Image (tube, rainbow, N blue to C red):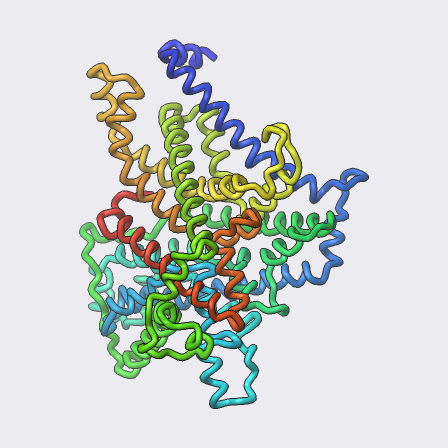
Amino acid sequence: MQKLRIRLARMTPGQIALTAVMAVVFTWFVLALLVLPLINLLRTVFFTETGFSFETFEKLLKSKKAMNSLKNSFILAPTLSVTVGFVGISLVLITEYFDIKGAKILRLGYLTTLIYGGVTLVSGYKFIYGSNGILTTALRQVFPDMDINWFQGYWAVLFVMTFSCTSNHMIFLRNAMRSVDFQTVEAARNMGAGQGYILRRVVLPVLLPSLFAVTILTFITGLCAMSAPMLVGGTGFQTINPMIHDFANMTTTSAKSLAAVLSLVLGLASMILLAIMTAIERRGHYMSVSKVKTKITKQKIANPVVNVLVHIYAYVLFVIYVIPVVMIVLFSFSDTQHIQMRSLDFRTFSLENYRTLLSSVSAYKPFLTSIIYSVTAAVVVGLMVVLACRFIQKRRDSISANVLEYSLMLPWLLPTTMIALSLMLAFNQPRWYMFNRPLIGTLILLLFGYVIIKLPFTMRMTKAAFFSLDNALEDASRNMGAGEFYTFRRVIFPVILPTVMAIAALNFNGLLIDYDMSAFLYHPTTPTLGVKIKSLTEDMGTNPNGMALTFVYAVLMMIISAVVLYLVYGRGGKDNIKE
């Protein structure tokens, strides 16, 4: 209490008023949009009209669809961790460790998942391998009796997600590979160690901490899979998130209760896995014993047969990654007739599909909607987190600072669908803390959802930027008579601005292609891009105009994502984001 009085005595009336307003806004946000909706979700699960009950869990055990979705998710998650781990490690070794011809071109192909993903990526794979896909159409000419629905179910979902979830490996494992000390590799070789032994006992220990972390993230991704099971899982392989979506959109109370309990199971599993990942991070990293590290030199594979096989494997992976991107780009210029026939004729190429999108309100409205939502959410999140981090920096180790930080990091523990469902169930009726207005079916609810899911990442990165600042800058400004607000505006903020802009760009990129949150909270008259692409992809076999529109959407999104990634990483942005 005495410390509080001292702080208030040092503050101007304007600073006291600003602090009070911030306290009210953040308290309202955390309670109204995070804590109370989650409490309401738990109440839906554990309380019925007669009081506390486990009746919802009994319904879950009796629901064959719900239990199958749980079983499928817990089958997909571990197998996906294995397949993505194998492919992801392969990509890093091919591009960073072994001397593979054309490694720079291969790297570009492997990195295509950074510029398109989610429902857009799945639609690309479905266009190649689906029942009316290019490959299926070609194979039917050779094998007329083949099952056109061959690319459906568990193996289809596993295939799509294996090649769409290696982005973390290409980012984090590549960075870990660059920290390998080549002197240690040379020392092992001079002692007679073979390439396999060096790779297993010298190189992999450096990668293990990052590998554990990305494996757990992959496991969580498998548990929370939504787009791939919805589009290529078919009726026989639906996971938890699609089932939550189906139950949540039903009108019966029991269905919504099942959706709530499924989201709770998913949330508990995510919390346990994130706790494991945090424990692994605290164990530390492998450190080189060399005093002066040297950059690793790519290793030529000594065995000629193995060398040829690895090259073949590398280029097969390249083809798998690149073909959907190339086909999407090419067919975006094709006419609807050739799209329907799954054939390319360069003489028919034109910009007609792009003109259709830009000239039709119904066509460009979802694109514009997603851009507006993404920009607004990125700006709101950035502003909130900058203010919060400044408060935490100035009130280090205080109870209020710790409460604020942990409150804004709470969404990190929860899957997107659990957050979306909690908002749906909380605001389907008027709430006094939301000005007695139901928010379900309004434009603002999806914006709240976007802001919530981007808070933890933005908080973690921005806080790192704040705490890496040199305190001498602020001290010098204060000694020259500058006020706290002037110091923040003219000294502190310009230093962290590149990081803030880079994070905002990455948030915009991620939200632009969002489907998981949008599927629950979008306004029926203003669907987002992810929702629109999903609906068009479902009609891919019968609606060539819709397919053409999907390709144009995908190309435009890839261009925007590529530009954003270039601005963040290609022009020194990689130095702006620091853990």
The reply to whether residue 4 is visible in this rendering is: yes
Q: Could you tell me which residue is drawn at 37 percent across and 72 percent down?
A: 334
Q: Could you tell me which residue is drawn at 65 percent across and 48 percent down?
A: 260
Q: Quadrant of residue 209?
A: bottom left
366 or 114: nearer the eye? 366
> In the rendering, at what x and y percent does residue 287 appear?
30, 51
Q: Is residue 579 above or below residue 108?
A: above
Q: Is residue 43 above or below residue 328?
A: above
Q: Residue furthest right?
A: 50
Q: Is residue 554 above or below residue 424?
A: below
Q: Is residue 526 above or below residue 236?
A: above
Q: Quadrant of residue 352?
A: bottom left
Q: Could you tell me which residue is drawn at 44 percent across and 61 percent down?
A: 120
Residue 268 placement, left or right of 548: right
Q: How many marks?
A: 0
> In the rendering, at what x and y percent does residue 30 appear?
53, 32
Q: Could you tell me which residue is drawn at 49 percent across and 64 percent down?
A: 80
